[in-house]
Amino acid sequence: MLKIPHFINGQPYDGRSSRYADGFDPALGEIVSNIPLAGQDEVDLAVAAAREAFAAWSQTPPQRRARILFNFKLLLEHDQEDLAATITREQGKILAEARGEVARAVDMVAYACGIPQLLKGQYTEQTGEGVDSWNLREPLGVVVGITPFNLPLLAPCWMFPLALACGNTFVLKPSERTPSTAVRLGELLREAGLPAGVFNVLHGDKMAVDALIAHEQVEALSFVGSTSTAQYIHTQASQRGKRVQALGGAKNHLVVMPDADLDLAADALLRAAYGTAGERGMAVSVALAVGSAGDALVERLAPRVRDLKVGNGMDPNSQMGPLISAQHRVKVLGYIEDGVEAGATVVVDGRAVNVAGHDKGYFVGGTLFDHVRPTMNVYREEILGPVLCVLRVPDLKTAVAMINQHDYASGASCYTRDGATARAFTRGVRTGAVGINVPIPMPAAWHAIGGAKRSLLGDHYLHGEEGVRFYTRYKSVTQYWP
Ligand code: NAD
């Protein structure tokens, strides 16, 4: 049984709390690790370490901070196979997807290496007679990241590389369901030359999060996870006057126009809806088939979904891995049941999937619903599983209106061959990310990810220049030498 430590002040730390969680291999359905859940003592220790390290780290010139991050980037690249295997074993996604996650995390670190340029201010000479003005962007202090199970490496990397590059110190509270990569990040950062205390990892649940929010030396919190947790953290942290950005859940739509290349659209939907077993925040879970596209699209999708090879993510032949937990599997099966009862047509039913030698694994096969209606729970709520809902709509205007009426507003895509349609769609939808002939419009490291409504609480998107703004305080300087 693997015992996972916290990582505090540059060292693994077993903790004093008597509370533990079981860690699972979701493909086997077996307990494989033991995870300590931090209490007030560990939170105090981690924040104190980060606070102490802040004095020197915030004064370290940005280019020296960048050099350490560059070393870290090289170490991440060197370690990518091990990191990917750890992600697959704990989270369940297939190895190819885990490798993709590592590659995107490396991009985030590479972007943060440009921090001297990103922190460069603006200068105006002669704002008055003999008066000059400029601005500074100064670090906040100790900042916290709270991350979900589905991106154990990438979600932290949306946060801490830029936070550290800006001169802050960091406490990461990863999902207690996928804790291992966070500790490895601590070890690699130490190896890269990061001083002790600048980056710390605390495992835990609501108790640790509450103690972090309440801690008076925590200046800001970044969160990615479900909407209910995002709302709770945003409210609690805002009430205490902390800076907070909180990305929540999603229900991403993909519109298929009658003029689209339908094979391309079907291939895209297969990857976007069933990749990572539909557990991605950016997964597409709704296809809006416009006009005559409906029957032809479902005809193309059905055999692709039926042929999806479900299995252990470590097996190179698997195309889709298990869900994260037994509990979540029951929830997803409940949604499928609910969709059937509500009258949606089940074109492919993944409930009875069987993976040889993995009887206890948390598998659900690819499921395809057609003729779903907007009032159904399977349309309105986030399922976070391999379930795609097809809805038929008469025209683009209706499709855009439906996207804009939905409670979630993370991403939306449109498949078309027509430039004017693409332009109208891009301008019309009010989601954080928009894709044209791209199923998952995941922004590159130098752009930013966010959303609106129940998908983003707070004002700032994550990473890119938005990240620099979130992790720094603006100071305007006016100087006169009589
Ligand atoms: P979650 O909200 O259960 O957990 C996220 C984090 O919050 C974890 O670290 C967890 O320990 C902590 N937490 C859980 N309950 C808490 C509580 N009551 N109080 C305080 N902290 C709590 O989310 P999850 O199941 O790990 O992640 C899946 C969710 O994340 C989905 O809704 C998905 O859409 C979303 N997500 C969104 C994006 C995006 O780009 N918007 C990206 C990835 C994941």
Image (cartoon, grey):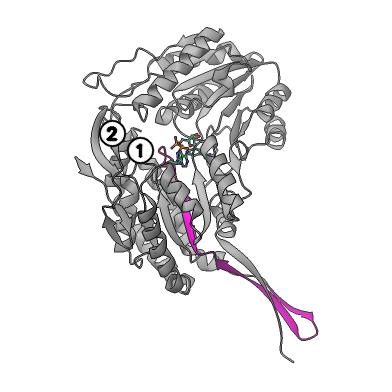
On residue 24, the disc is 2
**Looking at the image, can residue 261 be seen?**
no
**Which portion, as a residue range, is magenta?**
123-152
Type of amino acid under label 1: Arg
Seen from the viewer's position, the closer of residues 453 and 388 is 453
Position of residue 471 measured from the top left corner of the image (x, y, whole percent): 54, 59
**Looking at the image, can residue 464 be seen?**
yes
Position of residue 111 measured from the top left corner of the image (x, y, whole percent): 48, 57
On residue 213, the disc is none
Q: Is residue 476 left or right of residue 162?
A: right
Residue at 48%, 18% in the rendered image: 335
**Contact flag, marks 2 and 1 (Cβ < 8 Å):** yes
Seen from the viewer's position, the closer of residues 422 and 220 is 220
Seen from the viewer's position, the closer of residues 125 and 143 is 143
Residue at 29%, 57% in the rendered image: 187
Residue furthest toward the left?
1
Instruction: Look at the picture and state if 291 lies above or below 250.
Output: above
Q: How many marks?
A: 2
Quadrant where the image shows the N terminus: top left
Residue furthest toward the bottom?
482
Ligand 1 within 8 Å, label 1 CB: yes
Magenta stretch, overall SS = strand
Type of amino acid under label 2: Phe
Circle 1 is placed at which residue position?
A: 177
Position of residue 283 measured from the top left corner of the image (x, y, whole percent): 50, 31
Task: Please say whether residue 132 is one of the residues in the magenta stretch.
Answer: yes
Residue at 57%, 63% in the rendered image: 472
Who comes first in sequence, dot 2 or dot 1? 2
Quadrant where the image shows the C terminus: bottom right
| Distance between mark 2 and mark 1 Cα atoms | 8 Å
